[in-house]
Structure formats: C-alpha cells, structure tokens
Amino acid sequence: MNACTTIRGTAVYRPIRHATPAVSRTGARSALALACALCLATSSLAQAATAPAAIAAAPPAATADAAPTDANAVPADASGDTARYFQATGSDSSNAGAYADGDEALAAGEAASAVGTGTVALGAGAVSYAKHALAAGHNSLATEVSTTAVGGMLDLDFSYQPNGVVILQQTSASGVAATALGAGAQASGKYNVAAGAGAIASDRSSVAVGGIVDVGEDGLGAEGMQLQATQATGPLSTAVGGGAMAIAYSSTAVGALAEASSERTVAVGQSATANKYAAVALGAQTQATGEWATAVGNGARALSDRGLAVGAQAFAPMENGTAVGSSALALQQDATAIGSGAWAGGTRSIAIGKAMVWNGDFFREGPPFMFNDSIAMGTGADVYGDQSVAIGAGARVGNSTFVNDVQVITNNSVALGSGSVAERDNTISIGHAGAERQLTNLAAGTTDTDAVNLAQLRGVAGAFGAGSRVDAKGNLIGGSYLVQGTRYSGIGAAMGAFDTALTGLDTRIDAIANSGGGQGVSIGGGDVAPPSTGTGTNAVAVGSGATANGDNGLALGAESLAYGPNDTAIGANAKVNADGSTAVGANVRIAAVATNAVAVGESASASAASATALGQGASATAANAVALGQGSLADRANTVSVGSSGNERQIANVAAGSAGTDAANVAQMRSGDSATLSSANAYTDTRVTALDDSFNQLRTDTEHRLDGMDRRMDKLGAMSAAMLNMAVNAAGTQSPRGRVSAGAGFQGGEQALSIGYARKIGARASFSLGGAFSGGESSAGIGVGVDL
C-alpha cells in the first residue's frame, strides 16, 4: 500500500471494495468507474470505498474508525464528496485490486497494473508496465516505453446477441512510443499509431487511422457481414479510412477499403488497389497491379508493369501500355491510347483522339487479329492492318472488300488527310476515289526509289530530244528523230536506223582489214612515237601506240587498245579489255568483264557484260544496263538511265505504278508513245553504238582526235627538251647540299618546264631526280650514278 501525507494528516489508500449485492451485475460483464481524486483544491488525498447506502448516509462522527491514527480513517470533510463523484466496481469472479509499482505510477480499476516510472493504468484489467506508458480502458495494454493504449475490449463478432460467440480483441500498444486509440486498436511496432476501432499498426513508424468496415454494406462488393479492419502493417506504411490496408514497406492506403500491398505503393480512393512494387492508384475503384504501374481516375486500371491509365475507366492491361482519357484502351504491350474513347489494340500501336487501331475478330469466330506497330490519329481514324498509319478525321487504312465474310487486311500503308483511304498493301494515299488530292511542293528525287516531280518528267522528255514533251496530264509524248536523212517517230526506230548504219560501217572496215591478205594492218608510229601494232588476224591498228591484239579487232587512235577478238576501240587512249565490245571517244574504258559492252563519249565507261554507256562521262556498271546522256549512271542490271543523282534528267528505278493516281504512274508513261518506250526497252538487249549522225561525222571526229595527238606529241617533245637542259645543269655539283636546276623546252608551239635536284653521295656516287610539266601533261624521273 502507498501512503500519502497531506496538510490534514496521514491517510492510507486501500483496494476498492465491491458495492452491495443489491447492485445488479453479471459474471460476464464488469463496469469500471474512475476511483481516484487527484489534488483537490485542498491538496488532500483520500480513498473512498464503496458501501451500502445506509452506511454512506451515516454521519461521519458516528463511525468507530474516526481516530486519526486508524488505518480506515476518512477525513470528515471529504467522506461525502468522494463517494459521490468517484466509484468503481469489480466482477463477481474476482476481487483483485489495483497495483502500482514505480515512481509516480498510477493504477485505477479492478486488477489494473501500472509498473514503471510514470506509468498509468486506468480501467479494469488495464496493464501498463513500461516507463511512461499509458493504458486506459477495459483490459487495455501498454507494454513499451512511452506507449499509449486508450480503448476497451472489441467484440469482433458484432452480433450483439446475448448467447452469441464472443471474439474479443484488446486495445494494445506494444512498440516503443506507439499509440493505440480506440476499442481493439493495436499498435505493435516502434513509433506506430493505430486510431479507430480494431485499427492495426504492426511494424515500425506505421499509421493506421480508421475503423472497421463491413464489406457487405453500401455496395462494397460482398454479401453478408464481412469485416475488415484498417491496417498499416508494413514499415513506414500509412492506412487512412475504414478497412484501408497498407501492408508493405513505405506503402500508403487512403480511403475506405483502399489497398496498398507492395513496397512503395500508393492507393487513394474507395477500394483503390496498388499491389505491385511502386504502383500508384488514385481514384475510386482504381487498380494498379503491375510494378511501377499508375492508374488515375475513377475505375482506371493499369494491370501490368509500367502501365499508365489516366481517366475514368481508362484501361492499360499490358506492359508499358499507356491509356490517357475517359475510357481510353491500350490493350497490348507498348500500346498508346490518348483521348476519350481512343483504342490502341495492337502491340506498339498508337491511337490519338477518338481513333482506333483494331484488334479482335468482329465478323466471324476465330482467333483475334492483332495489328502491330500501327498509328491512328484523328476522330474516326481507323487502321486495320500491320505497320500502317491513318492520320486525319475519318482516315482509314483497311480494305473494304470481304472474302468469305472476312475483311481483307491492308499492311504497311499510309492514309494521310481527312477521309483518305488506303486499301492496298505498301501504298500511300492522300485522298479517296472521287476526292483525289494533288501532291504539291515535291522536291526532285535524288535516289533510285524517290518519287519524281513534273519538272523531272519534263527533263526526261528533254533527254529524248526531237520535240519530246510532257502534256498537261503528265503524259510523255515522243518526238521525231532524223537519222541519215530519214525521220523516225520514236527512239527505238531511230536506234534501229543507227544500228543499220553501224552494220554498214562494220562491212566497210572489214573490207579494209581484208585488203591485207588476212593479216593485221598497222598504220602510224615513227622514230619518236611508239608504233601501232595489229597482231590479230584481220586486226587493224591506226595511230601512235595503237594496239589490236584480238582477231578482227580495230584500234583507231593514239594509245588505243582493242584487246580481245571482235573489239573496237576508237579514240585517243580508248581501251577495250573485253571480248566483243566497242569504245568510241577519248579515254573511254571497257572493263575486262564487260563483254559485248558499248561505251561512246569522252571518259565514258562500261564495266559489266552487255552494258551500254552513251555520252560524255556516262557510266554503265551493271549487266545489260544502259546509261544515256552526259554524266548518266546505270548501276542496276537491265535498266535504262538518262541521268544520275543531281541531274535533272534522271528517271531511274521508280517502281511501276498500277493506278491512275499513283506518283509517276504507268498510265502516264503508257499514254505517250508506247511504241517509243517499247522499242527503247528492246534496244537495251542489243549492241548500241552511236556515232552521232553518220560515218562522215565519225571520220571528222577521228581527224580532230589525231590533231590532238599531234599536240600531245609536241608537248612530250618540249618536256624532253626541258628535262635535258635541266639535267645538264644539275650535273657536276660539288656542294654537299646538292644542286637545284631548271630547264625549259619548246616544240611545235608547245612549251614545257622542268625542275630537278642532284647531289653527290660520298666521293664516287651521286643521285638526281626531276619532273617536267606541259599543260595537262607531266613526267618525272630519278637516277643514281656510281664511279667504277
């Protein structure tokens, strides 16, 4: 027992006694009234025991225990007031008293126990046995330092039937500095707060605020009585609202029946659910059930990892899906739907606005179609195919044709513009039948598969010459060609006339070759220039250094070469290295693999079998290809090119159109002179040699080239004279650093300059080097001398 000294004397506290039997009680229930008076105005302390009414009414002076030293003494001036304002009762089955042990400890109530410094236990069965702990309420429990438990027992049966099953849960605060407020509230971890009937905070630094919810009430998704308590059972978790659950590390659940059941999740709103790592659900009945998933808006659902659903009833069920807008649907992996009612049904598909990339089978039973990598943008835009794009209100990619009640799918196509329709694979549409659009501001194509504009088509017509043109509808109209005095309508017929003229030329050349009695003929050469050589049977070589090695070969021009049988090389430095090929023009080249090839024009070249290059700098690098015009390039087999990249005359490698509204379509090309193009295509399989308009023009050109060779020989002579004079002046140097010398030469009106350097090496040796230059010609040399 604890004693207390007051200004009025010494009084002794003793356990509270039961009231008279006349007070009605049952063995299963007990009532607790606080029975302590703390520091009244007079600073006196007393204990009033319960007693029968007759005894309480007796005057204090009549009691036999009035002596001040009696253990049962009650101060005269307090005996009436304390019995009136402070009462406590116990149970029939127990008469255990309150117990307090520790400095400033306080216990009040049947079997109440306060053990430790500053502990407080108030209520029948209340237990507080840690420093500064507070337990207030029937059977409340505070078991750690600075914990607070306020509330009575909670009957989890909630049937309130006299004979019903009793399932009791006590209010408990069992973690350091934990707080439990409310009947049956439990705070079992450090620094936790559980507030509300049955609230549970069971780890560290968790907060649970809210009571118990009957899931069967108010349309919350269950029938009958199904109780759910507010729970914050994960470290650093927070649950606010009836039945809210935050049961993982750093989880937050706010709202009735909200659930945050994985680490770092957030669920805010009635029945909101976030149950995978770092998921966020904001809004009534939202669901974020994938890692890093986010659902915002009433009924929004993001069901897989990294999904995003924003807007009422937005739905993103697959990984990385994004649905933004009321009822937006992103139904497959990496799909994106933005806008009210947007539907992105395929993997990696995109729908923006009230647009749709289809998935599913709406016309017959069977597995659903999934259209991947497609895009639909605009109100009513519609895509029914893989890797397709529809942009614009009402734009559609998809064939309106049905086969066996199944819509025909359109893949890899684009519908661009309001109402545009693309119904064929691999096409781009900018309108629909009856509402076509012009494609304006189209830059000229520069690569083989680029579209061409009207200016380029006109360039093609100009390349054919002879008045060829493109009419107002884009059709190519052929011109009229004059060959050997005869006019031909169409390039094919004109080329045929050229071939006939060349055949006659071949006959005349054969006659010249045969005049040598079946042996080769060589014309040209002398004391200075190297001689021409015609070693093949019936071969002809004309010009300084010309060589015709193969049978029936013709080399005409300085340094020209006809290497194989039936080769023709005409022009200075023209080289034919393959059998049966023809080169006409200075510096023309026929590669060794280019059999039956033709190259005509200065620096023209043919480097593949049956290739034809016609025009200065023209190049045919693919088998059976034709390059027609200056600088033209034909680098694909079986093609005709009239230009190159950057040349306005190009018309190569454009895919054949199949409809009248296609770019550079077949209808435009065929509506011109179809006979001209047909003949030109046939002509690509034959040997073509263009010698301008006639053999006489060829002869005139040859004479001009021979004149050029004379000028070159004069340059070589001037260079030789310059080198000679330079060498004379470089010889005999005695300087250890050598001697630099120069010389000049002149021949036939040409001039040359040479520069050299000579130096002695020891007493018996020397070396020299030098070079000579004349116009576009140059030469260099080096020499070493040793005295024997």
Image (spheres, helix red, strand yellow):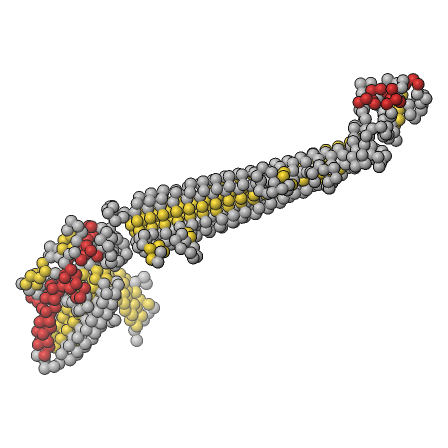
Above/below status of 510 relative to 619: below
Please state if 298 lies on the left or on the right of 527 as rendered.
right
Above/below status of 102 relative to 501: above
Give the percent coordinates (x, y) of residue 322.
Answer: 46, 46
* Viewer-side residue, 714 vs 208: 208
Q: Is residue 260 visible?
A: yes
Give the percent coordinates (x, y) of residue 578.
Answer: 22, 72
Give the percent coordinates (x, y) of residue 89.
Answer: 82, 30
Residue drawn at the location 34% of the way across and 52% of the way down: 398
Above/below status of 417 relative to 513: above
In which quarter of the view is residue 83 placed? top right
Q: Is residue 713 visible?
A: no
Q: In this figure, what is the number of numbered marks? A: 0
Residue drawn at the location 84% of the way across and 36% of the way down: 94
In which quarter of the view is residue 254 placed? top right
The residue at the far bottom in this view is: 517
On-image quarter of the C terminus: bottom left
On-image quarter of the N terminus: top right
In which quarter of the view is residue 630 placed? bottom left
* Viewer-side residue, 261 vs 783: 261
Residue drawn at the location 45% of the way across and 44% of the way down: 323
Residue drawn at the location 24% of the way across and 67% of the way down: 623
* Viewer-side residue, 93 vs 413: 93
* Viewer-side residue, 585 vs 294: 294
Above/below status of 503 relative to 427: below
Give the percent coordinates (x, y) of residue 492.
Answer: 14, 63
